Structures are given as C-alpha cells and as structure tokens.
Amino acid sequence: MEHRKDSKGSDSDRNSVSGDDRNEEENVLVGEDEMASNPFFTDENANWLKPKGGKNKLLSSDEEESENEGDDDDDLLEVEKEAQLVDEEMEAERLEADEEMRRTVRLHTSVYHLPTTEELQRDVDRVVPPSEIRSHIESILEVLADFKTRREPGRARKEYIDQLGLFLAEIQGYLPELIEYFLTMFGPAETVEFVNASDKTRPLVIRANTLKTRRKDLAAALMKRGVTLDPLANWSKVGLKIMESPVPIGATPEYLSGMYMLQSAASMCPVLALAPEPKERVLDMSAAPGGKTSYIAQLMRNTGTIVANDLKPERQKATVANMHRLGVKNVIACAHDGRKMGVMFKNRFDRILLDAPCSGLGVISRDPSVKVQRTIADVNQCAHLQKELLLAAIDALKSKGTSGGFMVYSTCSVAVAENEEVVNYALSKRDIKIVDTGLDFGKPGFTRYMQKRFHSSVALTRRFYPHVHNMDGFFVCKIQKLSDSRPEDTLDADEIAVMKEQTTTKEGKQVLEDDRKILHKKGGKKHEKKRKLDANMEKPKRVQVSVPPRPAQPKKQQKSDTSAKMTKPRRKKAKADI
C-alpha cells in the first residue's frame, strides 16, 4: 500500500512531521488494523469517521469546554445559582463548626490555673488591664460549668467562686460583700449578667395622663416634635418608650401642661397589682414625689380619696406640685411617721400601697453610688424598718370585704432580706395571705434561700431583673387581710391537742385548762407555746402569798337625820314701839 510506504520514509522526513500529524497517522494505522481484524467491517471510507487529532485531542477539547462552561455563569439558571450559593454557605458553616469544635476541644483539654494568693500579692503594684480580668472571669465560668473535669487538683469550688467575686468587684467597682451576696442569690454566670446589666442605662419611659389626654394623641403630639417612641409593652396601656428625642422630655409643653409623667416601667407594676377601684379610700404610705399616687388617681378617675403620706415634708412639695400639674383633685398630702399610721388610721383604708424605702440594689443604673456605699448592714437595717412599716400598713387596712382589704408591698431592691423575709415575717404576725399579683410577667419569689425556708405562697410574689426584663430591679407582693386577729394571740385546735399530749403526767392526769392558760401567758411568743414540757411535771401549785391586814380606818361620823319638813326657825316678831 502506498500510504504505508510513505509512512516508512526517511528519518528527516519523519522528524519534519508535526506531533499532531504523527498522532493522526498512528490512529489511522490502528484503524486499519482493526478493520483487518474485523471481517464484518466493509466501509472503505472509515478514516474520515475518526475525529481529527485522535483520542487525546478529543479529551483535551472536552476538558477545555467544561472549563469554559464553568467560567460562564451567565448560562446558569437562577435556581442553579441559588443552589450554588446554598452549597457555599453550607460549606462555610461546616468549616466554622469544625473550627469551633477544635477550639472547644482545646479549651476543655486545657486546665485553667487559678491565681494563688502569692501571685495576686505580686500584682498589687501592677496595673492589671481590664481585658486580663475579663479573661480570668470567662475562664473561671468555663471551669465552673464543667467543674469535675476542668478544675485544678486540690482546688475547691468555693475558691473559684471567691476569686470570681473579687474579679467582679474589681472590674465593676462594687464592694466585695455585695458581689458575695449576689453570688448566694444567683449562679455565677447569672451574677455576671446581672452585674453587667445593672450598669447599663434603662430606656426612658413616660406614662400618659388619661385625666387630660389619650396615649394616641400624646404620641402624635410628641412625634411632631421629632421624638421617636414606641409603646412600652402589651401589659401597659399608658406607657411610652422614648427612643430618641431632639428636645428635653422633661421640658416640653405637653409635660408642663400635665399630659404625661416621667415614670420607670418597673414602678408602674405595683399600681397595676393594687388595681384600685373608683370611690375607694386608698393610702400611699411613701408617696413622694407622687408618680404612683397620680397613677392611682388616674385609675380611680379622680374619685374617692387618696391619702399621700411621706415622712419628710420637704419631699411632699414635689408631690403637691405634680398633683396640681397633672390635674389630680382627690389627694390629701400629709407628713407622718409611717410606723404610726396603724394606730392613727386603724382599719380605715380599702387599699394601701407601701413602696417601702430600701437599699436600692435594683436601681444601680440610676444611682451608681449604691455600689460603694451600701453594705449588708444597711440592707439589714432597711429590712427592720420595712417590717415595722408593713405591720403598720396591715393594721390600717380594712379586713376583706366586697372589694377592699388588699395592699401591695414593693421595693426597688433585689435583696432577699428586704423582700421575701419581710413578707414571711408579716405572715407570722398578722392574719393575712399572699394572693396573685395579676402580673403575667416577672419571675416568682424565692421560697428558699440558703438555709432559710419561706411559706409556699411567697412564690406568688413577682421579681423583675435588669438582665431578664430590661427593667429596674423590683419586687412586688400583693396581700389580703383576713381579720384583725393575730396568730400569736391564739392557739389552733391542733396545737392545743399537742399541748395536752405533751403535758400528760405519769399518773394519767392532765393539766387543767386554766393552768394551760397561765403557762401560755408566761410563754409569750408562739414558739414558746409549742415547747415540750417534762413528762414528770406535776400540776403546778398556786403560791399562797400572805397579805398583811389593812389598817382600820376611822369611822366617819354619821350626820343627824333631818326631816324634810324642818324649816328655819321663825324669827320673833319685834314688839311694836309703844
């Protein structure tokens, strides 16, 4: 064949042939061999059926086309493009998850070194940056979250918590005893959240005065002045939250005309829990400067009578001014000691609001001096005053009736000593019960705190926290007075039965009822009435005391009986002169 002869030419000719031609010739030879081996193949023009450039050229062209197709995104559909984006996002999330897992493994496998006392003493003269202290706090929280595996050998949990309190007190500027008190109330992580949230400013809130306007009209008037605002919450129909304001909120014409009052969101909750009705007689024991008093008058529609009391007459000047500005006409302002109100106005009021003076541990954002001025001794002193005020308020409250007989005790503190302990003390001293506040938000009160246990109804009280509700720390408790009797003055039937069983002598004789009353009078307090008497105690004998005889008094001289018919002796007639 001629073609085969040509293919066997000289070396110079073979070298002059290009690489593509050489590949083409080899492919042609392979095709002829296949045709020779296949007896059924008869097409003589089979050479032109093979692709030009051979199999290698075909593969290379397919790869180039696929690359060109990948670079050309315009030919993809929108669905395909979105699918590619989703795939890329999933891949990024997978990489981020892998990195997070590696970081978690690295943290959990490493052991945090708690600084010793000597190391802390060396850092006394050194200015420790806040970032380093925050790093210590985060590390301690991680150790406490998985204490069994992350702690150092020989280290107790109390050491980590104590050191956490010192770091928090240093970076936040608190007294160490306050941080220690918060750590007994909350967990370590929640304490850090509470302390951080207490330093942040709360949103500015105003309350629309419905005695003069509606909230809708007030919002429209303020928005015309460029004020950005939102409704406070679903539970309030009169509250507005101010986001931005180009003008001072406390100096607008609407404020001066009495259309609204500056009042925090938390301080509205006690009035909502009190729920005063029109034409009732209400007492506000700590009224100044009149925010809650005006809200009570607003709910009573300016009817009935409200006695606004405060200890200091200077503070009542602001109360009187606010009542005039807001158009309140049913308020009587007075200045008396709240501890004497129970005697002055015994069983006189249908409802009472006692927003007791407290340490202010819930309003640190408004008064940062609390962090360095309040001590645990101050908290206990406030608690003693609050107990006296609460008992006086209960005495001034009417017993339960058709609508009255309710009071609200509230504080702007989160301390258990000023809240649950005070209420639990009142339960043991007066015939009252704790009822639902009617507030569908807030956390329930403590029924146990460290070694102390409170009445189960204390859980009906409500607590508000800055880090949970974005409000000032507050406590609200609603109380209903059942009667004027006091539990410490009476014995229950069960207690009498227990007393009789415990006072039985060996001979089977029981102490007489009059002797039991004598023992009760000597005991005084309730816990002494339940004391166990000795089993061998005999019937107490009455001590006979000899009384000296009274000296004989001289008998009074009896007056002579005179007849009623006796008259003065007649004067003798003078003889007529002769």
Image (cartoon, rainbow, N blue to C red):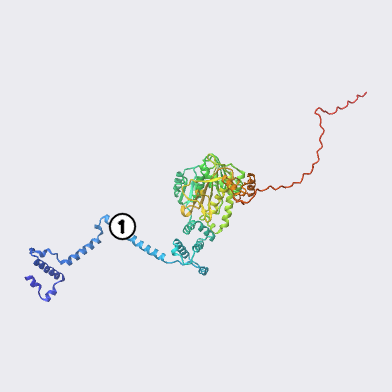
Compared to residue 73, the image places residue 406 above or below, namely above
Residue 263 appears anywhere in the view: no
Q: Quadrant of the N terminus?
A: bottom left
> Residue 132: x and y, percent?
46, 65
- Residue annotated with mark 1: 86
Q: Nearer the viewer, residue 233 or 559?
A: 559
> Residue 392: x and y, percent?
59, 47
Residue closest to the far top: 578
Q: Nearer the viewer, residue 492 or 207?
A: 492
Relative side of 435 to 569, left or right: left
Q: How many marks?
A: 1
The quadrant in which residue 149 appears is: bottom left
- The amino acid at mark 1 is Val
Q: Quadrant of the C terminus?
A: top right
Neighbourhood count class around disc 1 (C-alpha, 10 Å): few under 14, some 14–19, many 20 upward: few
> Residue 495: x and y, percent?
58, 47
Residue closest to the far left: 1
Residue 91 appears anywhere in the view: yes
Relative side of 172 to 534, left or right: left
> Residue 218: x and y, percent?
46, 45
Residue closest to the far bottom: 11
Relative side of 500 to 298, left or right: right
Q: Determine whether the residue tagged by mark 1 lies in a helix, strand or loop.
A: helix
Residue closest to the far front: 507
